[in-house]
Amino acid sequence: MTSANQLTILRMAFVPVFVLLVVYNYFGGALAIFLLAGVTDLLDGLIARRFGQKTPLGTFLDPIADKLLLISSFIMLSLTTLELTVIIPLWLTITVIGRDILLVVSVVIINLTMGRRLFSPSIVGKATTASQLLTVLVVLVANYLKVTVPFLRLLLYLTFALTVTSGLHYLAKGMKMFEYNRDEA
């Protein structure tokens, strides 16, 4: 259990704390946990690369930790039953979760039918993650300060467009793998 993996597991442990803080309207605490999770994400990657602590477990857990935090954030910040100043629209949350489900199912199918494959994130995928993180951060700050955000609608549409585009991009990439594998056989 490397220190990089311990940071990843810590980030996963932050998820229920974050959820509870949002449920009880402690947006300052939720914002702090979200930012702390971001710092641990940067640190675990830096430590893994710098000190040779890359492990199969870390490669597996790191994206799961990221997805758990992002999906939990989108769900919690979409709930109309909470007293939120600013809310993430349900259509965006469904799009984000739908894309992730599509990616997970595609990876499972590819790994089951063609053997273990590694998938490196594309530039569109990285831009999508950045816009999703920014969306959550802006909504958390807005709820903490109890203010509206004039550019939020633009950010929501940008996040939607990137999420759909990256989902289609990864789907096309997966289909090419199948075609290439079929042609090889």
Image (cartoon, rainbow, N blue to C red):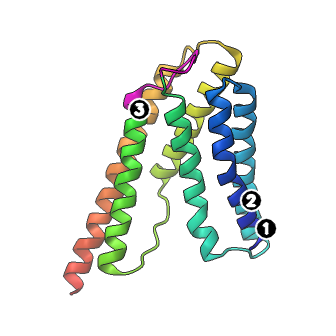
The residue under label 3 is 92
Q: CA distance from mark 3 to mark 1?
A: 35 Å
Q: Quadrant of the N terminus?
A: bottom right
Q: Quadrant of residue 4?
A: bottom right
The residue under label 1 is 3
Q: CA distance from mark 2 to mark 1?
A: 6 Å
Is 82 included in the stretch rendered in magenta?
A: yes
Q: Residue at x 45, y 49 (%)?
A: 124
Q: Residues within 10 Å of mark 1 (few under 14, many from 20)?
A: some
Could you say which is closer to the camera, residue 127 or residue 147? 147
What span is in magenta? 80-91
**Residue 170: percent from the left, percent from the top?**
36, 57
- Asked if marks 2 and 1 touch (Cβ < 8 Å), the reply is yes
**Residue 141: percent from the left, percent from the top?**
67, 24
Judged from the image, the secondary structure of the residue bearing numbered disc 2 is helix
Q: Amino acid at mark 2?
A: Leu
Q: CA distance from mark 2 to mark 3?
A: 29 Å
Judged from the image, the secondary structure of the residue bearing numbered disc 1 is helix
Q: Quadrant of the C terminus?
A: bottom left
Checking the image for residue 7, the label placed there is: 2
**Residue 148: percent from the left, percent from the top?**
59, 12
Horizontal side of 156 relative to 113 (left or right) equals right
107 over 156 or under it: above or below: below
Q: Quadrant of residue 98?
A: top left
